[in-house]
Image (tube, helix red, strand yellow):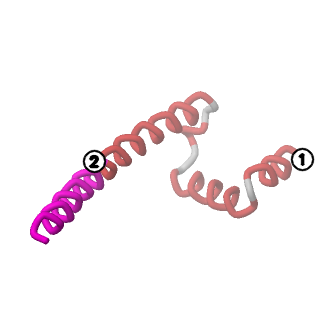
Amino acid sequence: MARSKTSARDALLKLRAERDELVSREARLREEAAADLGKVLLDCGAEVLEPAQLKQLLRVSMTLGIDTAIKRLSAT
């Protein structure tokens, strides 16, 4: 019976270590994704937008759906 508890404890410790690694990896990937998106903003000249305007534009676009938002913006 004692062996079972040790195995469960070891598995839990391993799981916690994996979780910590995933959190770290997610943070790194989010930073890389943000850098990639920043490059896109620079490429299309959007660096002149106010952050609040960009945030509002993206929220509305996500609410409408990207394809719908593009169609609406392209129609004008």
Left or right: 57 in relation to 26: right
Q: Label 2 near label 1: C-beta < 8 Å?
A: no
Q: Residues within 10 Å of mark 1 (few under 14, many from 20)?
A: few
Indicate the quadrant where residue 28 lies. top left
Q: Position of residue 19 (x, y in %)?
A: 29, 55
Q: Residue at x 42, y 37 (%)?
A: 32
Q: Quadrant of the N terminus?
A: bottom left
Check residue 13 for magenta coloring.
yes
Q: To which residue does mark 1 refer?
A: 75
Asked if residue 53 lies left or right of residue 16, the reply is right
Magenta part, dominant SS: helix
Q: Which residue is mark 2?
A: 21
Image coordinates for residue 60, horizontal then vertical, percent: 68, 61
Q: Residue furthest front?
A: 1
Which amino acid lies under the numbered mark 2 shown in the image of this protein?
Answer: Glu
Disc 2: CA contacts within 10 A as few (<14), some (14-19) or many (>=20): few
- The residue segment tinted magenta is 1-21
Tell me the SS state at disc 1. Answer: loop
- Disc 2, SS: helix
Q: Position of residue 31 (x, y in %)?
A: 39, 41
Residue displayed at 45% across by 36% down: 35
C-alpha distance separating marks 1 and 2: 46 Å
Specify the label residue 4 is tagged with. none
Residue 60 on the magenta span: no
Left or right of residue 18: residue 10: left
Residue located at (41% from left, 41% from top): 29
Q: Residue furthest left?
A: 2
Q: Residue furthest right?
A: 75
